[in-house]
Amino acid sequence: MSTLRNVMIYSRYERFWHWSQAVLIFILFFTGLRIHGTHEILTFGLAVTIHTWAAITLMVLWVFTTFWNFTTGQWRQYLFKQGIVKVIRFYAWGILVGEPHPYKKSLQRKQNALQSLAYMTFMTLIGPALWATGIAYLLYNLWSHFAWSNEALWIVAILHTAAAFAMGTFVIIHIYMTTTGKTPLHYVKTMITGYDKVELSEVEAAYLAETKSVDVQ
């Protein structure tokens, strides 16, 4: 038998990481568009400075978060899960006709199969592509003397821009997905407070009550 309880599923660090990363990504995208020449709200030099420091800050945040994920075991949340076809079908059709979500959140599975795949892609492909090309661009003076440097810089710039727009696409989809909860702001509230409704078995509820390892209301 299980009961629905209000459980803190996102720790303080997870929430700090999430919102800090979100702010830094928006700063990077905004300044990156200025560097690209899309707008002129900032001066070019100021945009480059802000973009560089925001990128360094985000990379440091990723290093600490990667360490945190592995030391706490949270890295398992990003592993591929079965049922991705059902989740995709739900968002493509089921949600429009009032079907129940095929995924039930638990302490062991905070993310559904589609979320896990999206975050894994973000962390293993999009993010590294941005960091590698960004660092290569910042260190251009160290390899600018090679005969192939001009062609290589052009390729680095193209790849960096492509990865940036891939990240922008990820963010747009992510924002849309936050509106698909029980209410349009349900997931936003969850990521602010850390609490969400989760089904707990009697054994799980008793264990959490005894160990107090997770806050349960």
Image (tube, rainbow, N blue to C red):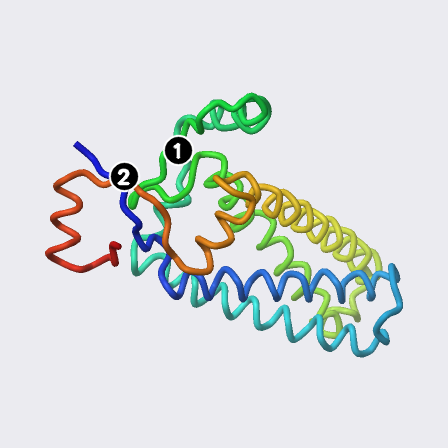
In the rendered view of the protein, which quadrant contains the C terminus? bottom left
Above or below, 70 against 13 in this view is above
Contact flag, marks 2 and 1 (Cβ < 8 Å): no
Q: Position of residue 82 (x, y in %)?
A: 39, 28
Above or below, 64 against 163 in this view is below
* The image quarter in which residue 213 lies: bottom left
Q: Amino acid at mark 2?
A: Glu
Mark-to-mark CA distance, 2 and 1: 19 Å
Above or below, 75 against 115 in this view is below
Q: Position of residue 108 (x, y in %)?
A: 29, 43
Residue under label 2? 199
Q: What number is the disc on residue 81?
A: 1
Q: Position of residue 192 (x, y in %)?
A: 46, 60
Q: What number is the disc on residue 117?
A: none
Q: Amino acid at mark 1?
A: Lys
**Tag in front: 2 or 1:** 2
Disc 1 residue crowd, few under 14, some 14–19, many 20+, Cα 10 Å? some
Front position in the image: 121 or 141: 121
